[in-house]
Amino acid sequence: MSPPHGGDDDTRKRAAQPIRAYGDRMGDGAVQLSFTLPVAASARAKEAARRYAEGLGLKHVLVTAMEAAGREFSFFVVYGKSDIVIDYGVIEVPEVKSAERTPKEINDVIKKQLGRRVVVVGACTGSDAHTVGIDAILNMKGFAGDYGLERYPWFEAYNLGSQVPNDVLLQKAIDQRDDAILVSQVVTQRDVHRENSRHFIDEAKRRGVHGKQLLLLGGPRVDHKLALELGFDAGFGPGTKPSDVANFIVHRLLQRRGAPP
Ligand code: B12
């Protein structure tokens, strides 16, 4: 078993570490940027893209690609250089902390230390119809060679699918006395993921679930910081493996029992 990710030394004061984007040479500030302008592709459009990138503060701008994107839109890729320097030393970001156990170790620890199956329910909620993310975490097959929670003998996992209303998911979790509720949010247009997640948390508070059952948020534009801000216990983004989620849940359940995590 490996120690928790992002240990306690995360909070220690770090030395200043100024950094700039790296392209060809260290500190050259070279960046690549892509964007769309609402004009048809043409030589004028290309010049507009160059000026736009300069307006963003880039120097030595080179428009390397222009593609028509529909009749009245053009997509651009530009290179440029930026003078911006940031201090990496002052950056602090909350990270999900849990021991890194293998699936076998996770099952063994649940059996020995909890002595009962861990019950979880998940769904892609609101109007969001994307199921692949939540399936990757919960279904047998799993993701990137890492089996999903359904495959763990000491997990009891329920996947309600997509477009599930928040109150339906919460009611199921209450009825089953689940240990954790997994919410997937993939569509982020007009911040619908934040709006729906806030609604979920409000409902969870109203029903007395908040602070009792573990609330996990996941999706391609979700991170731990955002999830904490919204009132969840943890957030998981792209590349999350089912064992990351299993590790977090078990870590927290053991912590709650006062057992060494
Ligand atoms: C497949 C797909 C679809 C399929 C979905 C099929 C299905 N059954 O899921 C269909 C065709 C139905 C579809 C529809 C739409 N889609 Co779509 N779709 C995609 C696509 C190509 C792939 C998404 C995917 O499967 N990713 C793979 C999974 C494994 O990754 P993931 O979701 O990030 O999940 C991982 C992590 O985020 C995390 N995770 C995710 N959820 C959770 C939850 C928990 C609790 C935890 C712990 C972890 C976790 O773990 C997973 C494994 O690591 C993406 C583009 C892309 N390349 O990403 C667009 C994309 C997501 N779709 C998009 C859009 C706009 C739509 C539509 C609105 C299009 C339309 N105008 O009709 C509709 C949405 C309808 C709706 N009501 O939701 C946009 C979203 C843009 C945005 N920022 O909001 C994208 C990004 C495409 C784009 N570039 O425009 N889509």
Image (cartoon, helix red, strand yellow):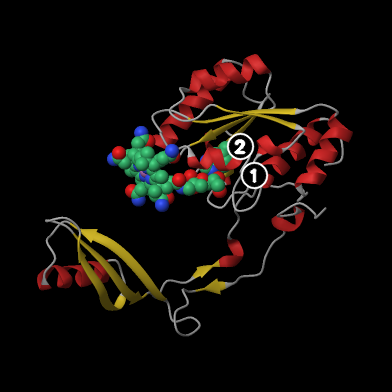
Q: In which quarter of the image is residue 255?
A: top right
Q: Are marks 2 and 1 in contact (CB under 8 Å)?
A: yes
Secondary structure of the residue carrying numbered label 1 = helix
Identify the residue under disc 2: 138
**Would you place residue 109 above or below residue 101 in this image?**
above
Q: Does the residue labelled 2 lie within 8 Å of ligand 1?
A: no
Q: Which of 36 and 95 is in front in this view?
A: 36
Identify the residue under disc 1: 242
Left or right, 253 with respect to 78, comes to right
Q: Which of 59 and 2 is in front in this view?
A: 2
Q: Nearer the viewer, residue 99 or 212?
A: 99
- Point out residue 121 in the picture as x, y percentages from the top left corner: 61, 27
- Point out residue 1 in the picture as x, y percentages from the top left corner: 83, 53
Left or right, 210 with respect to 127, comes to right
Farthest residue toward the front? 141
- Residue 221 appears in the figure: no
Q: In which quarter of the image is the C terminus?
A: top right
**Would you place residue 11 above or below residue 15 in this image?**
above
- Point out residue 37 in the picture as x, y percentages from the top left corner: 19, 59
Q: 10 Å neighbourhood of mark 1: few (<14), some, or many (≥20)?
A: many
Q: Quadrant of residue 35?
A: bottom left
Secondary structure of the residue carrying numbered label 2 = helix
- Give the residue type that dot 1 points to: Pro
Mark closest to the chain's N terminus, 2 or 1: 2
Farthest residue toward the bottom? 25
Q: Is mark 1 within 8 Å of ligand 1?
A: no
Q: Which residue is drawn at 60% across and 53% down?
A: 144
**Would you place residue 198 above or below residue 40 in this image?**
above
- Give the residue type that dot 2 points to: Leu
Q: Residue at x 13, y 59 (%)?
A: 39
